[in-house]
Amino acid sequence: MQAVMGREKVFRFKQFAVINDRTAMKVGTDGVLLGAWCPVEGVHHVLDVGTGCGVIALMIAQRNASAVITGIDIDHGAIEEATLNFKASPWSERLTAIEGDFNKLQVPDSYDLIVSNPPYFTNGVLPTGDARTQARHTGTLSYRQLIEGAAHLLTDDGTLALITPTDAEGDIIEAATFASLPVRRLTRVIPVEGAAPKRTLWILSRRDMTYREDTLTIAYRDGAFTSDYIALTGAFYLKM
């Protein structure tokens, strides 16, 4: 699904393509899962935190024909790339990429939906100048900072949707409690049938809704994708 055009790597989906050569974080399963899974019905204003090449923002634009989406990233190369990808898409008039620190973001309006595929390395020393490691390290944006910031930027019934490693569940629940942004749904993602979950998809919201907890298995033991994964991502991947 990924091709090389000159020196730029292009990942092609059914309705759009993304260059992901400059950004530290490339197109991956985590981002695609979140972009396909997050709730978009009735959403008008969306913020994609740590947008990278913009794939999640583009998926939301495909799924919701009226949503206006802003992607923010601290990495200059990511914003350059996201801007190119947004302009080349069918939804360019609804997509904007801004360079900046989410911790310092000040906007006049609130968001119906905030999405993030956040950094997830919480331990160890951060190597100087390693953009990919910085993009994956919570030293630049902790789970608590993300959730508390989202709590201030969301509308009263807005939603924060994110994906994390499963072993971060305790941290997310604690941060959500402190921010008064309750967990309303979590989906544990199993990479291969019979394996332990590796990722968790989250919905946090002040809106009153029934709590839901479930699982999603990506592939069977023979490598074939499950029907649930195909149903979730089939509108995007070329070979589904």
Image (cartoon, rainbow, N blue to C red):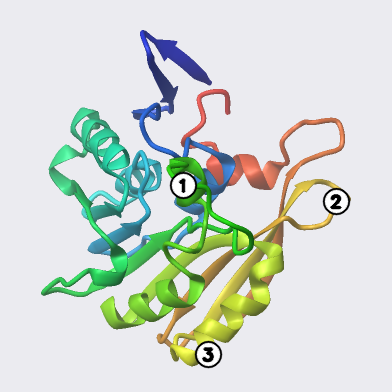
Asked if labels 1 and 2 touch by Cβ distance under 8 angstroms, the answer is no
Residue that appears at 62% across and 39% down: 230
Query: Is residue 68 visible to the viewer in this orientation of the structure?
Result: no
Q: Is residue 155 left or right of residue 210?
A: left
Q: Answer above or below: position of 102 versus 198.
A: below
Q: Which residue is mark 1?
A: 128
Left or right of 197, for residue 185: left
* Real-space CA distance between mark 3 and mark 2, rounded to the nearest whole angstrom: 30 Å
The kind of residue tagged 3 is: Thr
Q: Which residue is mark 2?
A: 195
Q: Residue at x 35, y 59 (%)?
A: 49
Label 1 crowding class (10 Å Cα cut-off): few <14, some 14-19, many 20+?
Answer: few
Three-letter code for the amino acid on which mark 1 is drawn:
Thr
Q: Looking at this rendering, what residue extends furthest in the top direction?
A: 6
Instruction: List x then y, in percent, for residue 196.
Output: 83, 56
Q: Position of residue 102 (x, y in %)?
A: 30, 65
State the separation of the CA atoms marked 2 and 1.
35 Å
- Which of the numbered marks, if any, corresponds to residue 177? 3
> Regarding mark 3 in the picture, which secondary structure is present there?
helix
